[in-house]
Image: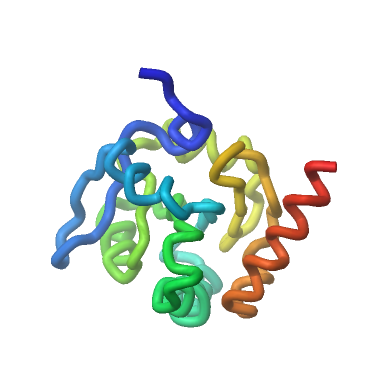
Amino acid sequence: METNKLQEILGDKLIKVEGGAISTVEFSAFNTGFAAKGEYVALYFGAHWAPPSRLFTTTLKDKFYTKLNEDQEFAGKVEVIFVTDDRAPDHFERNFKQMPWYAIPYTDEHRRANLKSKYGICELPTLVVISADTGEVVTHDGKNNVSDGKGALAKWKEMKSQSAQ
């Protein structure tokens, strides 16, 4: 079976918190739900040891992710994928268990390092927004758009159309 652009970026397995426990989700299962409406993947690079990341997690969850997914028109259009820079698995778990979205597994150090390198991540937190259909970067600065809630999608759509020209 041919892999798509998102699978090349995210890998074959993601993880998600379900019922207080972290479970593995095959990419195909993730994509089955996401592909129907998904327009953007927001790669959230952060770590529990970085206080700005802890603050941003709350903003991303409360002002953006939850609000978006409560609205039928916008639900499912954006999926956040956490890419940790935590130094210990227990720190990662404590941090990730507060998040409603998916993550690259902590144990997949190679993929996490490659993503940091590929997107030139120098500071935490960083939110890189990519197009779900092409895998191309829409913005490296998604962090500054999420406080606009649903308005972020309009900005990303405009950025995406400008980069396509």
**Residue with the most extreme top position:** 1
Residue at 37 percent across and 43 percent down: it is: 31
> Quadrant of the rendered structure where residue 30 is?
top left
**Residue with the most extreme right position:** 165
Residue at 65 percent across and 62 percent down: it is: 142
Left or right of 35 in this view: 64: right
| Above-or-below relation of 108 to 123 | above
Residue 143 in picture, x, y percent from top left = 63, 67
| Above-or-below relation of 128 to 65 | above
Left or right of 23 in this view: 66: right
- Identify the image quadrant of the C terminus: top right
Left or right of 157 in this view: 150: left
How is colour applied across the structure in the image?
A: rainbow
| Closer-to-camera residue (90/11) | 11
The mark tally for this picture is 0
Residue at 49 percent across and 37 percent down: it is: 6
| Closer-to-camera residue (54/20) | 20
Residue 128 in picture, x, y percent from top left = 61, 53
Residue at 64 percent across and 42 percent down: it is: 119
| Above-or-below relation of 4 to 10 | above
> Quadrant of the rendered structure where residue 69 is?
bottom left
Left or right of 59 in this view: 155: right
- Identify the image quadrant of the N terminus: top left
Q: Can see residue 139? A: yes
Residue 86 in picture, x, y percent from top left = 41, 54
Q: Can see residue 105? A: no
